[in-house]
Amino acid sequence: MTDSPITQPFARSILHNIARVLVGKAEVSGLALAGVLAGGHVLLEDAPGTGKTMLARALAVSLGLTFTRVQFTPDLLPGDVTGVSVYRPTSGEFQFVPGPIFTGVLLADEINRATPKTQSALLEAMGEGQVTESGVTHTLEQPFVVIATQNPIENEGTYRLPEAQLDRFLLRLSVGYPTLEEEVRMLARLQGQHPIYALTAVAAPGELLAARRAVQAVHVSEDLRRYMASLAARTRTHSAVALGGGPRASLALQGVAQALAWMEGRGFVTPDDVQRAAPGVLAHRLSLRIEARLQGVPAEDVVREMLRSEPVPVESGHAQAGAVTLR
């Protein structure tokens, strides 16, 4: 971690802890932490066995948050996630029994193996931090984070997440396969007991909430706001896109860019922060046209093409204030 651009002590300690479990995944770990710091939820999409669950567990343990894992299956019911009201004969009343969603970090493992009805049980909790059952609203304690994993949608026995569900995730990230050298290091590290069992917290929930407030205070210039809004608007007019990102997309882009800047010890956002965040923030919010899907065009490539074609703000002599001018 000596050559890492992360200089903020809180973020650096978290990522160093995660690196004890995951080999060679500094970039995806950093983006996942940025999503949590921005107050959002993270979707990890990749082939089985690439470390998605380990990343979620390591992040939860490092932040000192309670962790609950729910294996999503076709027979999972919404009440199995949110909780149900149970009739108590002794009192003659219904009592709410909280489900596993009442936790610090909920790992929705293989979320796209459950039916859309069960997937939708997460919508209110992710969007509003609460659960409503039998007309009664139950508030979730903060911080509350959903980290979901899913296998590629082409796999047998999976259900495509609807657009409304995808939009609730601040980021969609891919862990990716390790390089040959990384896999050799992984084999050596995992020869004995898995390091996840020896991992301990290096932060507390209160520190995460304080870090979120600090992230929100990171300066964003007017030109950068226009740049992010223009990128979001471009997703709605691109020839390969049938349905682009809504205003939540630009809000998410700003939040993740602020988190990335804060993690590097800066009080202002730069265009590089926006460009680093954009693929993970925007790609899963795009519904590609049938022609692009038949050609196998990844949504991330469409976002990168937008980044190349959109005029980029450049820093002026007042970078410390986050001032930029268009190039």
Image (tube, grey):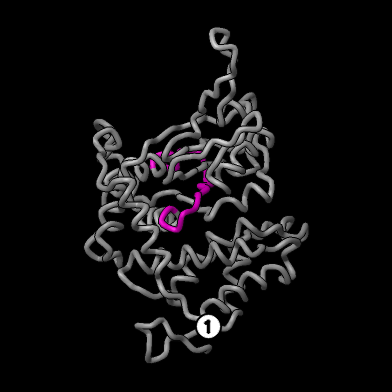
Asked whether residue 215 is drawn in magenta, I would say no
Q: Please determine whether, in this image, residue 160 is positioned above or below residue 173.
A: above
Magenta segment includes 48: yes
Residue plotted at (49% across, 53% down): 40
Q: Residue 6, image x and y in percent? A: 30, 64
Q: Using residue 193 as the reference point, say whether residue 318 is left or right of it.
A: right
Residue 323 visible (yes or no): yes
Query: In front here: 74 or 10?
Result: 10
Of 30 and 206, nearer the camera is 206
Quarter of the image with the N terminus in it: bottom left
Q: Position of residue 312 (x, y in %)?
A: 53, 82
Image mark count: 1
Name the residue furthest front: 91
Q: Residue furthest bottom?
A: 317
The quarter holding residue 119 reads: top right
| 302 shown above or below 35 | below
The residue that mark 1 highlights is 223
Q: Is residue 34 above or below residue 20?
A: below
Expressed as whole percent of the image width and height from the top left, the position of residue 51 reads 42, 42
Label 1: state its secondary structure. helix
Boundaries of the magenta span: 36-54
**What residue is drawn where x is 52% and y is 23%?**
97
Which residue type does callout 1 highlight? Asp
Q: Residue at x 40, y 49 (%)?
A: 178
Q: Position of residue 227 (x, y in %)?
A: 56, 78
Q: Is residue 189 left or right of residue 309?
A: left
Q: Most extreme residue toward the top, as rendered?
A: 90
User: Is there any visible trace of residue 181 in the rendered image?
Assistant: no
Query: Which image quadrant is residue 198 in?
Result: top left
Residue 139 against residue 133 in the figure, above or below: below
Report the side of 224 relative to 246 (left or right): left
